[in-house]
Image (cartoon, rainbow, N blue to C red):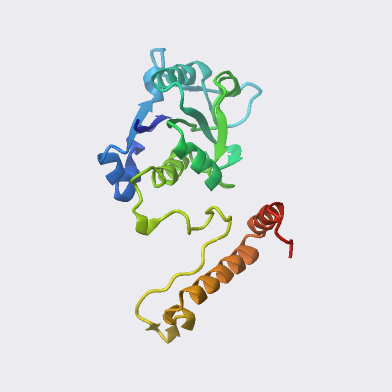
Amino acid sequence: MTWRASVLTLFPEMFPGPLGLSLAGKALRDGRWALEALDIRGFATDRHRSVDDTPFGGGAGMVMRPDVVDAALGAAIAAQPAARRIYLTPRGRLLDQALVRELAAGPGVILLCGRYEGVDQRVIEARELEEVSAGDVVLSGGEVAAILLLDACVRLLPGVMGAADSATEESHGPEGLLEYPHYTRPAEWQGRTVPEVLLSGHHAEVAKWRRARAEEATRTRRPDLWAKHLNRNAGEGGRLD
Ligand code: ADE
């Protein structure tokens, strides 16, 4: 079965956007995944096609109406009852590669993109949406976060990445480390050379060097990931040092 993404948005013209190009675009044309952008405004019922209203309790901005969002979600869920239902919001759990792997392994996703101040809380609860954030930043809407999530999922789908571009030795891979640095020709550029060991042809030494650089990068740049990595290894009988 084709992995399927339904995106509920007020800006359907933002899709496929960058997902129509490069790796994800080719996979889309090859039928390895399917994308449908549903216009939430199409589910508005009043004369003005209104999708939002002022917040109860006062304050700035507008809130997306639960009835309109619910109708859009109902249509997406009817077409894809087994899909994970995700609302993209800076209030959500942070997206990480573990969640991306889970989503890519499933039948597909329904992604609700908020605009304005967000969506009425009741529809989030009634439809049991998982709230997911693309990072500790505030975007102008969930669409760019949805594109980010889909890009990360699609590259993991069977047949999308070639063997040369394997997902096993990359940042946030199974080991929970950042990746080692890369070098290509020329061997000297602007007076800068390539680490000797990479030119040596000693595969075991290269692997050792890369492992050390991956650990160093993780420890210095992402102490949070480093702590998790150490914990995981401790759990597997490794030492904490
Ligand atoms: N909408 C606005 N900011 C967002 C974020 N950081 N993640 C997901 N959706 C968003």
How many numbered circles are shown? 0
Q: Is residue 142 visible?
A: no
Q: Is residue 150 visible?
A: yes
User: Residue, x 36% and y 59% (percent of image)?
Assistant: 164
Residue 233 spot, x, y in % from top left: 67, 56
The one nearer the camera, 160 or 239, is 239
**Quadrant hosting residue 182:** bottom left
Q: From this view, report whether residue 57 is shown above or below residue 13.
A: above
Residue 166 spot, x, y in % from top left: 41, 55
Residue 104 spot, x, y in % from top left: 45, 39
Residue 218 spot, x, y in % from top left: 60, 63
Q: In this view, which residue lies farthest toward the bottom?
A: 191
Q: In this view, which residue lies farthest toward the top?
A: 46
74 left or right of 235 in image: left
User: Residue, x 38% and y 20% (percent of image)?
Assistant: 79
**Quadrant hosting residue 19:** top left
Which image quarter is the C terminus in? bottom right
User: Residue, x 44% and y 84% (percent of image)?
Assistant: 193
Which image quarter is the N terminus in? top left
Q: From this view, report whether residue 230 is shown above or below residue 214.
A: above
Q: From this view, report whether residue 205 is shown above or below residue 101.
A: below
User: Residue, x 73% and y 61% (percent of image)?
Assistant: 239
122 left or right of 110 in image: right
Q: In this view, which residue lies farthest toward the left?
A: 29
The one nearer the camera, 61 or 230, is 230
Q: From this view, report whether residue 156 is shown above or below residue 119.
A: below
